[in-house]
Image: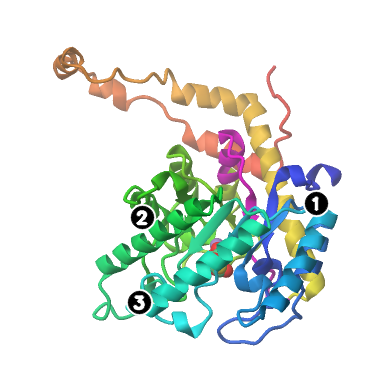
Amino acid sequence: MFAMFTPTPADKFTFGLWTVGHRGRDPFGEATREAINPVTIVRRLAELGAYGVNFHDNDLVPIDASVIERDHIVGEFRRALTETGMRVPMATTNLFSDPAFKDGAFTSHDPRVRGYALQKTMQAMDLGVELGAETYVFWGGREGAEVDAAKDPMDAIKRFRDAINFLCEYARDQKYALRFALEAKPNEPRGDIYFASTPAYLAFIQTLDHPEMVGVNPEFAHEQMAGLNFYHVVAQALESGKLFHIDLNDQKPGRFDQDLRFGSESLKTLFFVVKLLEESGYSGPRHFDAHAYRSENTDGVWDFARGCMRTYLILKDKARQFAEDDEIQSLLAEIRGADERLPAYDRGVATHLKGFVFDRAALASRPLPYERLDQLVIELLMGVRTGKRVSG
Ligand code: GLT
Ligand code: MN
Ligand code: MN
C-alpha cells in the first residue's frame, strides 16, 4: 500500500524553491527554521520522487549578486539538476519583495518602476530558459491598491497589458518556446489586487497581442480566498485550453493566504480537482505552492512535501475507484439520462422549439438522487468503499 502512493517523476510533481525553502516567517514573527540551499532542495526533492523544482529569480540568485556570483550559483544548481535528473518546468520573477515595487511593478504610476520590472523580468526569463523552463508565471502580488482614489484600475489594466505584450515580443524575439501563465489572487499583500480571480485573467488574455502564448496558473488558496469553487475555475481554464500550470495547496475559507499542505483541509473539492486533472488529459506539472506549518523544523518540511504528493496520489486512486464503482456509475447514468446535445440553430429548429408544448410537471418530477450519490462519494473518500466492482 505504501509503495502504491510513492511518487515518481512520471507523476510530474514540482515544488517552488520558495515553498520547501519557506522559513516560517509571517507578518507577526521571524523565521522559525534555517534556510535550505537550492542544491539541497533539489537533492531532497529528487529523493522523494519529485519531477522538478521552480523558482523566482531571487530564490536562486540574490537581487544584489555580482555576475560572478550569479554564474557560480547557477552552475552549482545546474549540476544538481543534471545529477538528479530534476527539471525546471517553470520559472517566475519576484516583483513584490523589493521596496521599489511597493506600489506595483507593471502597474506602477512610475514609468521607471515599470521599466525596471520589465528589465528584471527579461533577465529572469533568460535565467529560467537557461535552466529549461517552458512555462513562465506572472503573479502580480503588488499590482493593486489600498487607496482607490490614487489609482485608476483601467490604467492598471492597460499598463499590465502593455507589459505582457512587451514580454511576449521579447520571448518571440529571443526564440524562447515559453508560455506565460497568469496567476490571480484577490488580495494580500495589497488591500485589493487587480485581476482578482482566474476568470478575470481568462477574459484579459483575449485582449493581448499574442493570446495563444498566454494562459493561467490558478491557485487553490487564492480562489478559495475569493469564495470561488476551484473545481469550476480549473474546469473553465481547461475547457478554454488555457490551463498552462496549476498551483495546488489548501486553504481554510475566510482567512489569509495559508498555502497549506495539499489536501490538509478540503479533501472533497480537491478530489474533484485531481479527478478533473487526471481525466482531462492535463499533462503539465502538478505544482505544490504551499509550505510547512511555521511550527515545523527542517525535517517537518520533508514530511510536508511527502504529504502533498502522497495525498495527490491517494486522491488519484480515489478517482479511479469512482470510475470503477458500479453503484456510483449506474446512479450517474440514471441521473444524467440521455444527455444529447440540442441541435444547433437554424430557423426551422427555432420555429419547432417555439411551438413545442413542454410537459412542465414531467420535467419537474424527474428524480435526482443526489443525496445517495453524494453519500457514496463521501463514503468512498472516507475509505469504506473498496473501489472494487460491486455489481451482483
Ligand atoms: C508567492 C505567491 C504564490 C505565487 C508565487 C509565484 S510567489 O509565493 O504567494 O502564490 O505563486 O510568484
Ligand atoms: Mn501561487
Ligand atoms: Mn498562495
Quarter of the C terminus within the rendering = top right
> Residue at 63% of width from left, 33% of height from top?
322
User: Which kind of residue does numbered mark 1 sit on?
Assistant: Gly
Quarter of the N terminus within the rendering = top right
Question: To which residue does mark 1 refer?
Answer: 85
One can see residue 38 in this view: yes
- In the foreground, 40 or 391: 40
| Residue 346 image offset from top left, x and y in percent | 20, 17
Q: Secondary structure at mark 2?
A: helix
User: Which kind of residue does numbered mark 3 sit on?
Assistant: Pro
Q: Earlier in the sequence, mark 3 or mark 2?
A: 3
Question: To which residue does mark 2 refer?
Answer: 200
| Residue 169 image offset from top left, x and y in percent | 43, 54
Q: CA distance from mark 3 to mark 2?
A: 25 Å
Please identify the quarter of the rendering in which residue 105 is found: bottom left
Q: Is residue 370 above or below residue 362?
A: below
Please identify the quarter of the rendering in which residue 14 is found: bottom right
Residue 278 falls within the magenta-colored stretch: yes
Q: Answer yes or no: disc 3 within 8 Å of ligand 1.
A: no
The label nearer to you, 3 versus 2, is: 3
Q: Which residues are magenta?
A: 272-295
Q: Secondary structure at mark 1?
A: loop
> Residue at 69% of width from left, 74% of height from top?
70
User: Which kind of residue does numbered mark 2 sit on?
Assistant: Ala
Q: Earlier in the sequence, mark 2 or mark 1?
A: 1
Q: Are marks 2 and 1 in contact (CB under 8 Å)?
A: no
Q: Secondary structure at mark 3?
A: helix
Q: How many residues crowd mark 3 within 10 Å: few (<14), some (14–19), many (20+)?
A: few
- In the foreground, 206 or 331: 206
Question: To which residue does mark 3 refer?
Answer: 111
Q: Is residue 72 above or below residue 100?
A: above
